[in-house]
Image (cartoon, grey):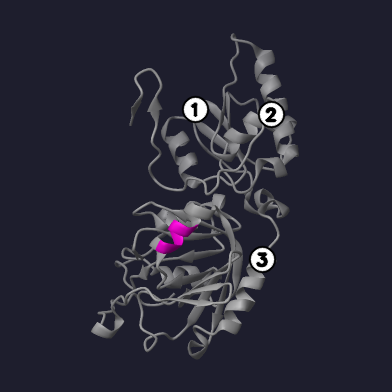
Amino acid sequence: MSKCDVIERSPKMRRRSPVVELEGQLHLYAPQTYSYARMTRAAVLAMEDGSVWWGEAFGDGSPASGEVVFNTAMTGYQEIASDASYNGQIVVLTYPLIGNYGTFARAAESRRPWVEALVVRELVDTCREGTVDLDAYLRSYGVPGLAGIDTRALVRRLRAKGTLRGAILQVPPHRSGDPDVAREAVAKAQSIPPLGAKPLVVEATGLARQSGSGPKVALLDTGLKENQIRCLVRGGATVRTFPATASARDVLSWAPDGIVISNGPGDPAAIPHIAAATRTLLDAAISRGASRPLPILGICLGHQLVGRAIGATTSRLPFGHHGANHPVKEVRTGRVV
């Protein structure tokens, strides 16, 4: 891991006014945070609609591709990067300064980062004692990053057009802004298969493990966050995780007092076998009756799987909702909290 360094920005390194050039069907966006003179690792984000965003690379030097989504949280960038729900996605962070408190082991939501890449306005190269800077953290897991992007303009585009497929390529600094590179990157973005074509849940699921003491809660791991286990254990439960490949019989053989189906990546329609297992679990809970209740809770993807298990259909939002705040409307009063 690299040493944590604090970089004082010179006047040449401060933000520049947006520059937009038009080249045929390509919309080329120049870097917003760093000057070309400072740039040591240039990179480009291209999306299927022909928009091309130039910036500076950090993290790993490998290319990346996936759906481009955005997250509006002001903090928690490590938790976001390590959330398995983002498997297969390039995540744009709307808060402009990212990396200012480093990364540390207890903040990770899983064993590694799951984002395909992280896109930020400005990377802050600093961290506290006992932590690892974000650049080194991503690099150690082979995850690329892109800084110097006008994330506000990028998010406005995603809100207007919906989630788009995108690709990130790293190039020598002297080729930053090269239309030929831009066309290559756009072609790569347009060739990306739909997100449902990858076994995202199978990739994200973990091994069976058990912790805590008290009532037994079976947690079906379709890409869970570590905080779900912590909260259940803190509430007095014995938690045993089951991989997404586990059958309903596997789960029920442990004789749980409750079942939780976790969050996870991808489209629930792409994993009908897990929805079928969820249906079997629901049938088992119903057959027990009120005298021996078996409550079942679905979170995020798990919630959608429960819905599909009872005959509902699911459809994708244009750009989803990724952030720390979810407004809730109280139906009786109409008040939004």
User: Which label is found at residue 214?
Assistant: 1
What segment is highlighted magenta in the picture?
153-157
| Within-10-Å neighbours for mark 1: few <14, some 14–19, many 20+ | few
Residue 10 image point, x, y percent? 25, 83
Residue 122 relative to residue 275: left or right: left
Work out which residue is located at the far top of the displayed protein and give it.
291
Q: Crowding near pointer 3: few (<14 within 10 Å), some, many (20+)? A: some
Q: Amino acid at mark 2?
A: Ala
Which residue is label 2 attached to? 309
Considering the numbered disc 1 on the image, is that residue within a helix, a strand or a loop?
loop
**Magenta span has 20?**
no
- Prevalent SS, magenta region: helix
User: Which of marks 1 and 2 precedes in the sequence?
Assistant: 1
Residue situated in front as seen by the camera: 169 or 333: 333
Q: Which residue is the site of mark 3?
A: 190
Q: Secondary structure at mark 2?
A: helix
Q: 178 above or below 19?
A: below
Q: Is residue 155 magenta?
A: yes
Q: Nearer the viewer, mark 3 or mark 2?
A: 3
Q: Nearer the viewer, residue 169 or 309?
A: 169
Q: Secondary structure at mark 3?
A: helix
Q: Residue at x 70, y 66 (%)?
A: 191
The span from disc 3 to disc 1 (Cα, nearest Å) is 51 Å
Q: CA distance from mark 2 to mark 1?
A: 29 Å
Q: Amino acid at mark 1?
A: Gly
Q: Residues within 10 Å of mark 2 (few under 14, many from 20)?
A: many
| Image position, residue 138 (x, y; %) | 49, 68
Mark 3 and mark 2 lie on one chain; the one further toward the N terminus is: 3
Q: Residue at x 36, y 77 (%)?
A: 3
Residue 37's label in the rendered image is: none
